[in-house]
Image: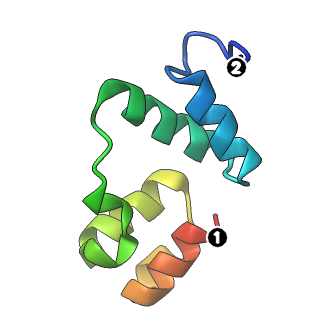
Amino acid sequence: MAKDHGPTIKSDKVYEDLREAGASKEKAARIANAYAGGTLDRNGTHLENRSKAALYGEAKEIGIAGRSDMNKDELIDAIRNH
């Protein structure tokens, strides 16, 4: 049984699985809540399928420094390794 992570985490099981796989707390929470809300875009999870503008927006949201000087491949790498 998954531990209760409080009202801010909507799917405790998904959150725990992501954390065990090495995802940050913030990233695991975002994905778990999107999964629970039914808004997880499975095609959108492939970073290569996203536009540079969308990648830049995500990098900005998670606080990646130097994002304005990055090309698409560098943004993908930075997001994956955050």
* x and y percentages locating residue 24 in the rendered image: 68, 48
Q: Nearer the viewer, residue 69 or 14?
A: 14
Q: Residue at x 68, y 12 (%)?
A: 4
Q: Can residue 65 be seen here?
A: no
Amino acid type of the residue tagged 2 in the rendering:
Ala
**What is the tally of numbered marks visible in this picture?**
2
* x and y percentages locating residue 37 in the rendered image: 33, 25
Q: Secondary structure at mark 1?
A: loop
Q: Please determine whether, in this image, residue 40 is positioned above or below residue 76.
A: above
* x and y percentages locating residue 56 in the rendered image: 36, 69
Q: Which is more N-terminal, label 1 or label 2?
A: 2
Q: Which mark is residue 2?
A: 2
Q: Alpha-carbon distance for marks 2 and 1?
A: 26 Å
Q: Secondary structure at mark 2?
A: loop
> What crowding class fits label 1: few (fewer than 14 Cα within 10 Å), some (14-19), or many (20 or more)?
few
Q: Please determine whether, in this image, residue 53 is positioned above or below residue 23.
A: below
Query: Residue tagged by mark 1?
Result: 81
Figure quadrant of residue 73: bottom left
Q: Nearer the viewer, residue 22 or 66?
A: 22
Figure quadrant of residue 49: bottom left
Figure quadrant of residue 42: bottom left
